[in-house]
Image (cartoon, helix red, strand yellow):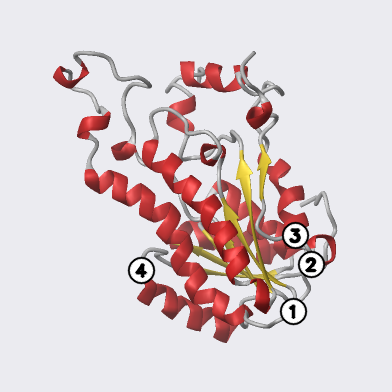
């Protein structure tokens, strides 16, 4: 992997949640290439193991762990395993998250008569779906932080990186639970940064714009591969006129993790969005 920044993470233990996914597996590969020992956590062990194997094949150190970020007892067990096999955590990347169709409305706007149609409206969104999405993103960040941040207390060079979203700045239509949860992540990032400021733990977040992932594939593209109307709207509101490439997140990621480059940076949420957050639409 060709890295945009060359930072030294030699012998650091980096824990990455959601590491079976497109973006977080890439994060894991990047920090491994910087010398870190990486724990790839995911509820899908097979996916995490695949990427751990790829990292090891490149000559770096990585181990995969099955982990449910919503179950503190499970996370405590994983913490013990990681500590025994790799060492105490120095850097935590909270990447677990995503949306779910059960928390998504069919239409962008409510119109008279929608309640009489067989569609998902704001009024009949399932509680279970909304709870799942909000908890996966927010509680799924809170619990791993509770478990792994204890290793970092008063230890130099430690940090936490959360994954927010452009939803946190301006909520997107159709996905109220995901938008609310990511807004909570940005707020929580600032809260944690202040809370841990006296013990040397920096806490920051990246806010990706629009990148194609497994979670949003069906929202962005039809089954035949053609773009959906939502894709057309996204790209027209993104001044750079395209989706981001996953690798374009790495410069910001590595900058925020570098104690040398960002030692006085904490409590920030950095957009990586092709100008989406700067564009008013006119």
Mark 2 element type: helix
**Which of the marked residues, 4 or 2, is nearer the chain's N terminus?**
4
Tell me the quarter of the picture where residue 51 sits. bottom right
Question: How far apart are the two marked residues, 4 and 2, measured between alpha carbons?
Answer: 31 Å
Where residue 124 appears, as percent x and y from the top left, is 20, 33
Neighbourhood count class around disc 4 (C-alpha, 10 Å): few under 14, some 14–19, many 20 upward = few
Question: How far apart are the two marked residues, 2 and 3, measured between alpha carbons?
Answer: 9 Å
Determine which residue is flagged by label 4: 71
Where residue 224 appears, as percent x and y from the top left, is 45, 19
Q: Residue at x 55, y 42 (%)?
A: 165
**Which of the marked residues, 3 or 4, is nearer the chain's N terminus?**
4
Give the farthest residue toward the left.
116
Determine which residue is flagged by label 3: 265
Where residue 142 appears, as percent x and y from the top left, is 46, 64
**Labelled disc at residue 45:** none
- Comparing marks 3 and 1, which lies closer to the viewer? 3
Label 1 near label 2: C-beta < 8 Å? yes
Neighbourhood count class around disc 3 (C-alpha, 10 Å): few under 14, some 14–19, many 20 upward = some
Determine which residue is flagged by label 2: 259
**In the image: residue 155, left or right of residue 71:** right
Determine which residue is flagged by label 1: 156
Where residue 111 appears, as percent x and y from the top left, is 27, 15
- Comparing marks 2 and 3, which lies closer to the viewer? 3
């Amino acid at each position: 992997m060709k890295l945009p920044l060359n930072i030294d993470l030699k012998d650091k233990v980096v824990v990455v949640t959601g590491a079976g996914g497109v973006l977080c597996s890439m994060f894991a590969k990047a920090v491994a290439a910087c010398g870190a020992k990486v724990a790839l956590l995911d509820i899908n062990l097979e996916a995490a193991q695949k990427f751990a194997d790829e990292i090891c094949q490149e000559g770096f150190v990585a181990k995969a762990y099955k982990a449910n970020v919503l179950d503190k007892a499970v996370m405590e067990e994983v913490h013990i395993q990681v500590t025994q096999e790799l060492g105490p955590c120095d850097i935590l990347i909270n990447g677990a998250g995503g949306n779910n169709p059960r928390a998504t409305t069919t239409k962008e706007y409510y119109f008279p008569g929608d309640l009489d149609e067989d569609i998902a409206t704001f009024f009949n969104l399932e509680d279970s779906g909304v709870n799942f999405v909000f908890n996966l993103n927010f509680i799924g960040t809170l619990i791993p932080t509770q478990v792994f941040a204890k290793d970092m207390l008063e230890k130099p060079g430690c940090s936490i990186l959360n994954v927010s979203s452009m939803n946190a700045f301006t909520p997107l239509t159709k996905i109220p639970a995901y938008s609310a949860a990511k807004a909570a992540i940005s707020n929580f990032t600032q809260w944690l940064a202040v809370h841990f400021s006296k013990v040397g733990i920096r806490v920051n977040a990246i806010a990706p714009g629009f990148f194609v992932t497994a979670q949003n594939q069906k929202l962005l593209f039809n089954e035949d591969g053609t773009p959906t109307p939502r894709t057309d709207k996204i790209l027209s509101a993104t001044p750079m006129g395209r989706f981001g490439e996953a690798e374009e997140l790495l410069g910001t990621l590595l900058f925020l993790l570098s104690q040398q480059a960002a030692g006085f940076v904490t409590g920030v949420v950095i957009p990586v969005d092709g100008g989406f957050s700067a564009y008013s639409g006119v």
